[in-house]
């Protein structure tokens, strides 16, 4: 049985199995194995494949104690380095069980959510985020959901993101409202897809003029049509090295890359303000 083989590997590495472990009441998942070592408790989830839903990763990431380290052991390699980075960005450790051995262990200790929240409250101000995209596309709602989820899971100091329902405004009123909304936001997340929008074009130009490049996140659909209709704006943006310029081809790829972009930027902010997560 796969769990027995993984158990044997952890025991040979000096971990001590905890057979009567009392699960915390606020733990949102059930581990396959539990070990202890050097004062830490390791909750091991054994996966016979390389697939795990994002919603389940979010549950694993909610660590009730700084002494608990969640570890996923995959019996197959993840599809790419991006998936590995996503798991690590959530504070989840992982390893592979391949050819009878535990390999490529990425074990990291994570501070308790309570302590991280205290540091964030003391050292950081709330970040307002503006979402720029066409109104009637699924990606727009996905971006909003991811920002809210990152706030919940990682305690990031985000307000609910701002997005404009264009139909509510007349042609004259909408540009004034765009100016006001972008003006009060620190970050701007822009999504470009195959259909051009004069409002998104205006939001891009406004963001370039008024925001620090590192606070602009640009997600561009990997299609020839998208590259063509947005060519003028993309040529201008590519000259700004600090902008988070990311391409995507699928809905799931957009989700993963947005999460990583947010995590990367927050890690920079944490380092600047000496916050240990």
Image (cartoon, rainbow, N blue to C red):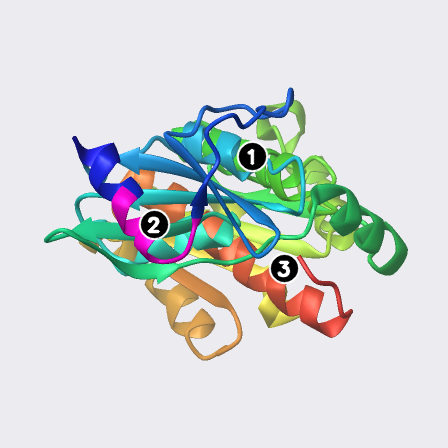
Q: Is residue 54 visible?
A: yes
Question: Is 10 covered by the magenta stretch?
Answer: yes
The label number, if any, that marks residue 266 in the structure image? 3
Give 241 or 39, whichever is nearer the viewer: 39
Image quarter where the N terminus lies is top left
The percent position of residue 209, horizontal first and vertical second, equals 65, 68
Q: In front of the other: label 1 or label 3?
A: 3
Q: Nearer the viewer, residue 76 or 35?
A: 35
Mark 3 residue crowding within 10 angstroms, few (<14) / some (14–19) / many (20+): some
Position in image of residue 10 (x %, y %): 34, 50
Q: Nearer the viewer, mark 2 or mark 3?
A: 2
- Label 1 neighbour load within 10 Å: few <14, some 14-19, many 20+: some
Q: Are marks 1 and 3 in contact (CB under 8 Å)?
A: no
Q: Which secondary structure lies at badge 1?
A: helix
Residue denoted by label 2: 10
Instruction: Describe residue 180's horizontal placement relative to residue 214 as left or right.
Output: right
Element marked by disc 3: helix
Report which residue position mark 1 lands on: 144
Left or right of residue 184, residue 38 in this image: left
- Sequence order check, earlier mark of 1 and 2: 2
Q: Report the residue at 74% width, 51% height from top.
A: 185
**Residue at image point 46% right, 70% down:** 237
Query: What kind of secondary structure does the magenta stretch mostly adopt?
Result: helix
């Amino acid at each position: 049985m796969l769990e027995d083989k993984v158990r044997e590997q952890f025991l040979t590495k000096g971990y001590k199995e905890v057979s009567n472990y009392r699960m915390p009441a606020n733990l949102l998942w059930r581990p396959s194995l539990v070990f202890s070592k050097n004062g830490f408790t390791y909750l091991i989830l054994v996966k016979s494949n390389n697939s795990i839903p994002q919603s389940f990763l979010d549950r694993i990431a909610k660590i009730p104690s700084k002494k608990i380290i969640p570890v996923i052991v995959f019996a197959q390699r993840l599809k790419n380095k991006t998936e590995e980075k996503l798991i690590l960005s959530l504070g989840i450790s992982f390893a592979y069980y391949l050819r009878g051995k535990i390999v490529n262990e990425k074990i990291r200790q994570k501070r308790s959510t309570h302590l991280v929240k205290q540091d964030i409250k003391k050292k950081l101000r709330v970040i307002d985020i503006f979402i720029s995209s066409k109104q009637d596309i699924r990606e727009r709602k996905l971006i909003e959901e991811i920002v809210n989820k990152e706030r919940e899971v990682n305690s990031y100091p985000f307000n609910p993101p701002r997005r404009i329902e264009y139909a509510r405004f007349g042609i004259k009123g909408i540009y004034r409202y765009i100016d006001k909304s972008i003006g009060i936001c620190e970050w701007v997340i822009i999504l470009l897809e195959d259909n051009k929008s004069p409002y998104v074009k205006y939001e891009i130009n406004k963001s370039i003029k008024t925001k620090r490049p590192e606070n602009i996140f640009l997600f561009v659909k990997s299609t020839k049509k998208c590259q063509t209709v947005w060519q003028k704006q993309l040529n201008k943006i590519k000259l700004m090295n600090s902008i988070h310029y990311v391409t995507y081809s699928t809905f799931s790829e957009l989700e993963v890359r947005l999460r990583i972009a947010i995590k990367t930027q927050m890690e920079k902010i944490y380092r600047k303000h000496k916050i240990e997560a």
